[in-house]
Amino acid sequence: MMAKDTVLTPETVTKPKVEKPRLYKVLLHNDDYTPREFVTIVLKVVFRMSEETGYRVMMTAHKFGSAVVLVCTREIAETKVTEAMDLAKEAGVPLLFTAEPEE
């Protein structure tokens, strides 16, 4: 009697496709009233930027009207905007940050 060869076929496992969350950008908007020093402090404290990077972002907003500060998930973007706006409100300055979907 001859033994038949047993052929094992691997079980196919399909992984569910996980969509990456949509990214949002946090924007710093220029205004002519908030002191530059305060803007760089907010960028350092809330967005963990170095003083040099914060200054560059602030100057970009000053020259072009707005600057991207951070790209992240919606929840993080909204939290960072709230933190930054709370600091501006406490200081009584019109500093403005917004979050919008990245294109």
Image: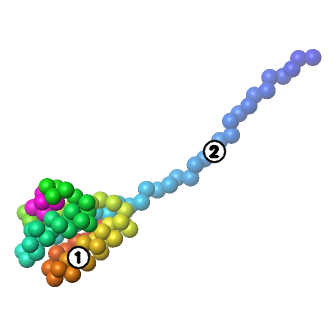
Q: Where is residue 11 in the image (x, y as percent from the top left)?
A: 68, 40
Residue 78, percent from left and from top: 33, 71
Whether 51 is drawn above or below 34: the answer is: above
What amino acid type is highlighted by mark number 2?
Answer: Val
Which residue: 14% across, 79% down?
A: 93
The residue type indicated by label 1 comes to: Leu
Tag 1–tag 2 contact (CB < 8 Å) = no
Q: What is the x, y in percent for residue 30?
A: 12, 70
The reply to whether residue 19 is visible in this rendering is yes
Observer-nearest of 101 and 48? 48
Q: Residue 87 carries which label?
A: 1
Give the residue at mark 2. Answer: 13
User: Where are the magenta residues, as a range?
Assistant: 54-60
Report the residue at 10% width, 75% height from top: 34
Which residue reaches farthest right? 1
Neighbor class of circle 1 (other Cα within 10 Å; few <14, some 14-19, many 20+) is: some
Q: Nearer the viewer, residue 51 or 62?
A: 51
Q: Circle 1 — which element? A: helix
Outermost residue toward the top in this view: 1
Which residue is found at the position 25% from the left and 60% from the top?
48
